[in-house]
Image: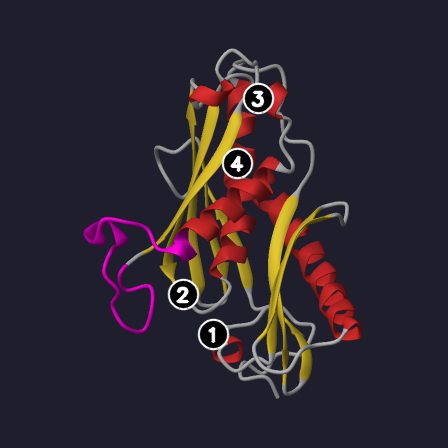
Amino acid sequence: MRPSGRLPNQMRLVSLEPGVSKYAEGSCLARFGDTHVLCTASTEEKVPPFLRNTGRGWVTAEYGMLPRATLERTDREASKGKQSGRTQEIQRLIGRSLRAIVDLSALGERQIKIDCDVLQADGGTRTAAITGAYVALSIAMAKLAKEKRMSKSPIIGGVAAVSCGITELGPVLDLDYAEDVKAHADANFVMTADGKLVEVQGTAEGAPFSRGELDALLDLAQHGIAQLGELQKQAIGGA
């Protein structure tokens, strides 16, 4: 039995609540069980120097955890004067995942900044951030199109992410913290709505895992991401 009582292919209870931020052009509160991430999208009518006069836009992301997002308080990274390697890696992952489904030429010379703030962490914060960030981005792009600031939304597909792992029960979907810390292997999958892979991060925590086990994790990820895609559509449609 999984600690949560879920079946191996069962997600945690997931909710994607749009429009939670009054001022952001797009926002979504992503809840994956007890992992809660606030995602906001902000537009700027300028691009980084390397994209000036190219006619192309940019999508980037920042990620952070509140001090009491975890069981014990952690200091804000701002108080330390630098971001951790983990934080930098995650926010780059979020940015890459979103740029995979955006036509940067259609975006024009503007930048979309995504902020993902972890309010509460119980495993899978990066996957929840990517899934919620897509909703926030989609809402922001629809707003720009509605305001005639662009002819149409530059979003050309969907993207979501989920974690999987190999535990004593075998391959399981959507690890919470209790499973993650004891997993023999864990992996994060980022996939587009049409089933293409954007990124796969997999690590054996003990003994190496087989190609067959990796395929089983991928099958679980596809199953979970299909469900997340439907929830994303509902959230965007209800914004």
Question: Which residue position is annotated with label 4?
Answer: 137
Start and end of the magenta stretch?
Answer: 67-87
Q: Secondary structure at mark 1?
A: helix
Kind of residue at badge 2: Ala
Q: Is residue 22 visible?
A: yes
Residue at x 61% of width, y 79% of height: 6
Query: Which residue in the structure is indicated by mark 3?
Result: 107
Sequence order check, earlier mark of 2 and 3: 3
Q: Residue at position x 61%, y 25% from top?
A: 153
Is 85 one of the magenta-colored residues?
yes
Q: Earlier in the sequence, mark 1 or mark 3?
A: 3
The residues bearing labels 1 and 3 have C-alpha atoms spaced at a distance of 38 Å
Q: Is residue 237 above or below residue 66?
A: above
Q: What residue is shown at x 53% (from left), y 79% (from top)?
A: 179
Q: Tell me the residue that label 2 is attached to.
A: 121
User: Mark 4 or mark 2, which has the lower sequence index?
Assistant: 2
Query: 145 or 89: which is nearer to us?
Result: 89
The kind of secondary structure the magenta stretch mainly shows is loop
